[in-house]
């Protein structure tokens, strides 16, 4: 009898365990469901009409010509030259508004590679507010190996 009571006492009662596999399956199914059913809102962008490929033009563009240069690695606004006159961002909208009507028809932006996109977008916004109809981009033709 002692033996039976000793055997009963030596048995350990197992703790109930929760099986995690079904829970993980449910979480993955929910994750897949939300990934598939989620729609992403497209970010508004700027439409740019690119010119057809071909030989570079040597003719001087008509209208306002904006040249932008930025010191290498600088986070500040670069130097802006509007029709061979250095301008500041604060004066830019007044310069656009003071331009003759035939010049206001087109703004050509020519910038270096390291100019911040933010600066170009600000210039485009100011030009549109001043009544400039079209905005174009020009690049400087570089020699081989540059």
Image (cartoon, rainbow, N blue to C red):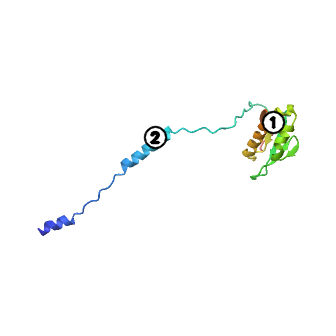
The foreground one among 35 and 59 is 35
Q: In the figure, is residue 14 to the left or right of 106? A: left
Q: Quadrant of residue 138?
A: top right
The N terminus, quarter of image: bottom left
The numbered dot on residue 73 is: none
Kindly report the distance in space between the C-alpha atoms of the residues bearing marks 2 and 1: 49 Å
Left or right: 5, with 31 as reference point: left
The residue that label 1 is drawn on is 107
- The quarter of the image holding the C terminus is top right
At label 2, counting other C-alpha atoms closer than 10 Å, the crowd grade (few under 14, some 14-19, many 20 or more) is: few
Residue 141 in sight:
no
Q: In the drawing, does residue 44 fall left or right of residue 38? A: right
Residue drawn at x 13%, y 69% is 2
Question: Residue 130: where, in percent of width, then height?
Answer: 80, 37
Q: Earlier in the sequence, mark 2 or mark 1?
A: 2
Name the residue: 78% across, 33% down. 134
Give the residue pinned by disc 2: 33
- Which structural element holds mark 1? strand
- Residue 43: quarter of image: top right
Whole-percent x, y for residue 86 in the image: 86, 46
Q: Of residues 138 and 127, which is closer to you in this image? A: 127
In terms of depth relative to the viewer, which is nearer, 112 or 105? Answer: 105
The number of callouts visible is: 2
Image position, residue 28 (x, y; %) = 43, 45
Residue at left 65%, top 38%? 44
- 13 relative to 108, above or below: below
Q: Residues within 10 Å of mark 1 (few under 14, many from 20)?
A: many
In percent of width and height, residue 91 lies at 83, 45
Callout 2 secondary element: helix
């Amino acid at each position: 009898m002692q033996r039976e009571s000793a055997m009963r006492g030596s048995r350990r009662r197992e703790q109930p365990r929760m099986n995690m596999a079904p829970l993980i399956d449910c979480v993955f199914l929910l994750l897949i469901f939300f990934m598939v059913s989620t729609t992403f809102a497209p970010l508004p962008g700027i439409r740019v009409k690119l010119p057809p490929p071909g030989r570079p033009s040597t003719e001087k563009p008509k209208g306002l010509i904006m040249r932008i240069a930025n010191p290498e690695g600088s986070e500040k606004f670069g130097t802006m030259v509007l029709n061979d006159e250095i301008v500041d961002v604060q004066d830019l909208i007044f310069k656009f508004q003071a331009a003759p009507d035939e010049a206001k028809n087109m703004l050509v932006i020519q910038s270096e590679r390291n100019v911040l996109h933010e600066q170009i977008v600000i210039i485009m916004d100011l030009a549109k507010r001043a009544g400039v109809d079209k905005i174009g981009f020009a690049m400087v033709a570089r020699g081989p190996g540059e």
